[in-house]
Amino acid sequence: MGPSLSSREKSGSSVNKAQVSRRDVFALAALGLIAGAPRFANAAGPEGQLTWGIHVSLAPTWFDPAETPGLITPFMILYALHDAVVKPMPGQPLAPSLAESFSAAEDGRSYDFVLRQGTKFHNGDPITAEDVKFSFERYRGASHSLMHDRVATIETPDPQHVRFHLKAPWPDFLTFYATATGAGWIVPKKYVEKVGDDGFKKAPIGAGPYKFVSFNPGVELVFEAFDQYWRKTPSVKRLVFRSIPEESTRLAALKGGELDIAYSIRGELAEELRSTPGLTLKPVNSPATFWLYFADQWNPKSPWHDERVRQAANLALDRKTINDALTLGYSKLTNSLIPASFEFFWQPTLPVYDPAKAKQLLAEAGYPKGFDAGEYYCDSSYSNVGEAVLNNLQEVGIRSRLRPMERAAFLKGWGEKSFKNLIQCGSGAFGNAATRLEAFIVKGGTYAYGSYPDIDALALQQAAELDHKRRAAMLEKMQQLVHEKSVVAPIWQLAFINGVGPRVGQSGFGLITDYAYTAPYEDITIKGT
């Protein structure tokens, strides 16, 4: 299918897709110049089974797009079970999916989506404009207040047409709606209203390339190919996601043929994987930045209230050694929580390892012998990163105790702002500098425990600024202030290292830019089928 334009933008427009930059793709997609591809059938039909070793315990909250946090983890399920109006896909950061085309009004105050004809949910119900409206209105995940506050009304003039009216022009509407959150992923209104939110998590029905079969908590999640998926019939009939939090167990299962793909293998185990005949090491350059967050920095009684103490923690981190030991040097050393690939990224000075200077700053702040920093909260799947950071902090006198938690519990506690002391944070979510800052730094952000008035003021200004250069300058200034105030101590931009077994044809790693996991699932293949 060729380019599709609304009547508002047809005249005088042309596109040379081969020369479109990342920024241009966003702009062109917002004008409706990029339309979705046609469906291709798999003549032989889906065959066989592939099994993943998942590095975290899967949580039912991730089955429901309405509860998507500002992190990438749930998207490993969303890309199989559900589909979105528009979503990141290979070669397109904003690919029309359930919508065959979309467009923006010249004044930037409304967005139109024309839904694809003939698309269905897994229960056979047609996907309509009412489902799109319903899915947005029930969305309660990351940035839900921000989006709901900026959308005035949603029109559904006919079953295939949805129009969002904004209260004021908002240049990031599509970035939030289609990439950084789960608000644009569609669920069946009639079914959800019938079974309720809890019933939906027990037996979710989506519109993605794979149907839900079963879920055994802590053990495995099973999907089966949906042969009526609009884009193409999946090649693989059955997908099995096995929860195996222990890295060595995942690698052993991969080597033994019990798994076909194993997520997150680090350190010496990654070396073993790389040297094992028949297995392939697959490092993915993800936008997953990790950082140390000083949750108590706004408390005048906390040592972290002193900027010098936060600077000391930053200088104490031996990032290169951690990178070499855990990700074989594949991760990128950074001094920002914004990925370098994101639009509006500001390049700070490179991180410096200087434990002597760190001790000096601690002494100047009144802690010549260091201090007890309390607990260090982290996702248990990255506790080895936490251990390395704690060792670095200990060397300069900052003493803390590791508190690893299963990912779902960690995300819940982090988002509910129930942690204190130190938090090891990370996010590989899609978006741009504005979406990342909104979630983690700006007042009201899902994971912001406090904020700074000058950064908050710039956040409001940039969100309404339509001039790209002026907006870029504001977002760069925000990042500069985060850096100068040492709001966080960046650790790295993670290289997500995985293992692939000999049966896999197309693994799906790296097909979607800035995405850590395998996708699109309908493109994944088994050798010889």
Image: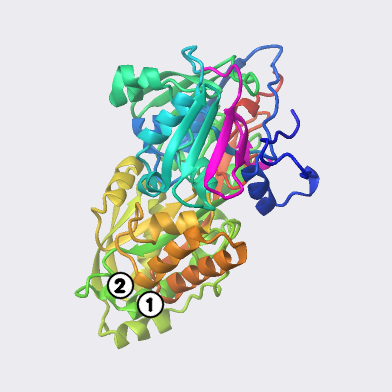
Q: Nearer the viewer, residue 132 or 225?
A: 132
Kindly identify which numbered label has been placed on residue 486. none
Q: Position of residue 141 (x, y in %)?
A: 37, 41
- The residue tagged 1 is 312
For the C terminus, give its image quadrant. top right
- Which residues make up the magenta segment? 91-120
Mark 2 and 1 residues: CB-CB less than 8 Å, in contact? yes
The answer to whether residue 503 is seen in the rendering is no
Residue under the image location 50 percent in, 44 percent down:
264
Q: Nearer the viewer, residue 260 or 71?
A: 71
Q: What kind of residue is marked 2? A: Ile
Task: Tell me where residue 192 sits by quadrant.
Answer: top left
Q: Nearer the viewer, mark 2 or mark 1?
A: 1
Q: Tell me the distance, in whole angstroms, between the alpha carbons under discs 2 and 1.
A: 9 Å
For the N terminus, give its image quadrant. top right
Q: Position of residue 47 (x, y in %)?
A: 62, 14
Task: Tell me where residue 56 sits by quadrant.
Answer: top left
Residue under the image location 57 percent in, 50 percent down:
107
- The residue tagged 2 is 398
Task: Tell me where residue 304 sits by quadrant.
Answer: bottom left
